[in-house]
Image (cartoon, rainbow, N blue to C red):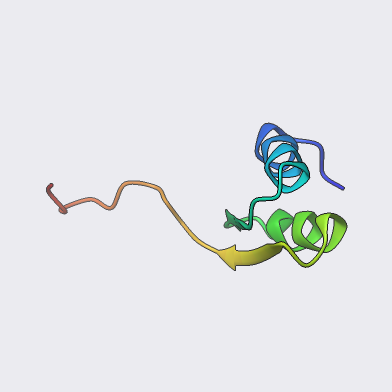
Amino acid sequence: MHEDLGALCAEVFVQEGAKVLAADISGGQIETAAALGPSVRALRADVRPTPGLSR
């Protein structure tokens, strides 16, 4: 499993009984979800700011 901060946090949440959504644009979320089991769903997402959008 890709051992980045997000994956490590997801692992702790799963150990505590949470359902987790692993979101990333790189594809690493698929590996994280597969490694952590059925409590984790993978989603490809780009959360970078979009030019021209305001809050």
Image quadrant assignment for residue 9: top right
Q: Relative to 27, does residue 9 appear above or below in the rendering?
A: above
Q: Residue at x 12, y 48 (%)?
A: 54
**Relative image position of residue 23 (x, y in whole percent):** 57, 56
Given residues 3 and 12, the one toward you in this image is 12
Q: Relative to 5, does residue 32 appear above or below in the rendering?
A: below
Q: Residue at x 82, y 55 (%)?
A: 36
29 relative to 35 in the view: left or right: left
**Relative image position of residue 53 (x, y in whole percent):** 16, 53
Q: Residue at x 69, y 57 (%)?
A: 29
**Relative image position of residue 20 (x, y in whole percent):** 62, 55
> Which residue reaches farthest top?
5
Given residues 2 and 38, the one toward you in this image is 38
Q: Relative to 2, does residue 43 appear above or below in the rendering?
A: below
Given residues 53 and 33, the one toward you in this image is 33
> Which residue reaches farthest front?
17
> Which residue reaches farthest left?
54
**Relative image position of residue 26 (x, y in whole percent):** 65, 55
Given residues 21 and 1, the one toward you in this image is 21
- Give the tally of numbered discs: 0
